Image (cartoon, grey):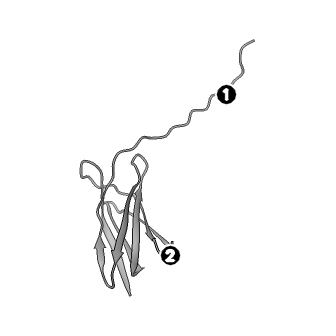
Amino acid sequence: MLGSISGFVRDPSAAAVPGATIAVTNSETGVVHTVMADDRGHYRALSLPVGRYDVRSSMTGFRSTIRFGIELAVAQDAVIDIDMQLGVLKEDVQISGEAPW
């Protein structure tokens, strides 16, 4: 009673996003399977129990993307392609020193 979820992760220009982290969460049990996209932007989460899943992708420089409510059936390979949008980079600046007298 297992299935899999796979697909491609792409940026706005349809180029692959290698190294993106994909978290596949069973919304009924909370169990998370984490995989990474390969150099072609392809990911595959294997041996998932049948049920309902949410798929979250994340990568530095991009906004996280979540697909909710993917119903996985027995022996199914659900294909969930992910289009990531560019995000804002967060940068912290620390300044230290003393005020002049």
The image position of residue 67, as x and y in percent, is 36, 62
Q: Earlier in the sequence, mark 2 or mark 1?
A: 2
Amino acid type of disc 1? Ser
Q: Nearer the viewer, residue 6 or 64?
A: 64
The image position of residue 83, as x and y in percent, is 30, 55
Q: Is 30 placed left or right of 87 in the picture?
A: right
- Residue at image location 39% in from the left, 74% down from the top: 52
- Disc 2: which residue: 29
Sort mark 1 into few (<14), some (14-19) or many (20+) by Cα contacts within 10 Å.
few
Asked if 62 appears above or below 97 in the picture, the reply is below
- Disc 1: which residue: 96
- Residue at image location 39% in from the left, 48% down from the top: 62
Q: In the rendered structure, are the residues bearing label 2 and label 1 in contact, judged by CB atoms less than 8 Å apart?
A: no
Disc 1 element: loop
For residue 74, what is the image quadrant? Answer: bottom left
The image position of residue 75, as x and y in percent, is 31, 84
